[in-house]
Image (cartoon, rainbow, N blue to C red):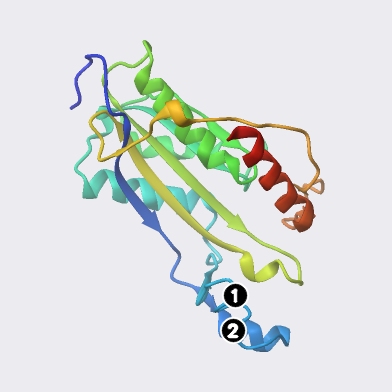
Amino acid sequence: MVSSNRPSDVGILAMEVHFPLDYVDQSEMETFDGVDSGKYTLGLGQLGMAVPGDREDVNALALTAVSRLLSKFQVSPDQVGRLEVGTETLVDKSKSTKTVLMQLFGDNADVDGATVINACYGGTAALLNAVAWVESSFWDGRYAIVVATDIAVYAKGPARPSGGCAAVAMLIGPDAPMVLDCRTKATHATNVWDFYKPNVSSEYPTVDGKLSNSCYLHALDECY
């Protein structure tokens, strides 16, 4: 159990990653899509694209990752005081993935945190929220857990081979081997329509890849 003294070197203490067993061979996807050999395997550097089973959603992926994290690193549920989830994949428009994960914590209902819904940045925001909690006066000496999980699905076209699914669970606390130095953090946030999902009945996003690349480079220039 970590102490309640003022923490230092806050960051990632441990990590567990979960990929489903099912996947699409990217070389077969190249053949199916009628593109040049190596376009996905070499151009994207991917040999396989994970896909969920018919009984797997982001809640199931997150449950597996967190359960394994607690077991592998011998973390008792009552040692956890905050649980943050970052995702852009909705199972329910109201009930969050964080609440589903609470079944892993037994009688410990005193776990702060929420699910952050946001494309790409959701996991980063959840991680920064957890680190800020450990570094703040609200910290009660317990660990935080951060889960980043998604099922990325694209319509037929050039973006489809960049999809996939997974979940990563991170244990956050002081004296970490992977420290997050918030003094180097910078933020640039604007309202841009490069990636969004306006149709709640469809998993497919509306994407403007060229605009995204331009936004990333502009944000980097503005921050650093």
x 22%, y 38%: residue: 75
How many marks are shown on the rendered structure? 2
Q: Is residue 218 rendered to the left or right of residue 128? A: right
Point 27% across, 43% down: residue: 70
Work out whether residue 23 can be spotted.
yes
Camera-side residue: 46 or 140? 46
Q: Which residue is drawn at 65% across and 32% down?
A: 188
Residue 131 in the image, given as x and y percentages of width and height: 40, 28
Looking at the picture, which amino acid does disc 2 mark?
Gly
Of the pair 101 and 145, the residue shown nearer to us: 145
User: Residue 98 location, x and y as percent?
Assistant: 49, 35
Q: Where is residue 176 in the image (x, y as percent from the top left)?
A: 26, 35
Q: 144 or 99: nearer the eye?
A: 144
Q: Quadrant of the N terminus?
A: top left
**Along the line of sight, the residue nearer the viewer: 63 or 186:** 186
Which amino acid type is marked by label 1?
Gly
Residue located beneath label 2 in the image: 38
Taking the image as shown, residue 204 lies to the left or right of residue 82, namely right
Q: Measuring 23% from the left and 31% from the top, which residue is drawn there?
A: 175
Give the crowd class for mark 2: few <14, some 14-19, many >=20 residues within 10 Å.
some
Q: Is mark 2 on a helix, strand or loop?
A: loop
Q: Where 129 sits versus 101, above or below?
A: above
| 161 left or right of 198 in image | left
Quadrant location of residue 28?
bottom right
- Label annotation for residue 91: none
Find numbered disc 1 in the image and state the secondary structure of the residue it sits on: loop
Circle 1 residue: 43
In the rendered view of the protein, which quadrant contains the C terminus? top right
Residue 142 to residue 15: above or below: above
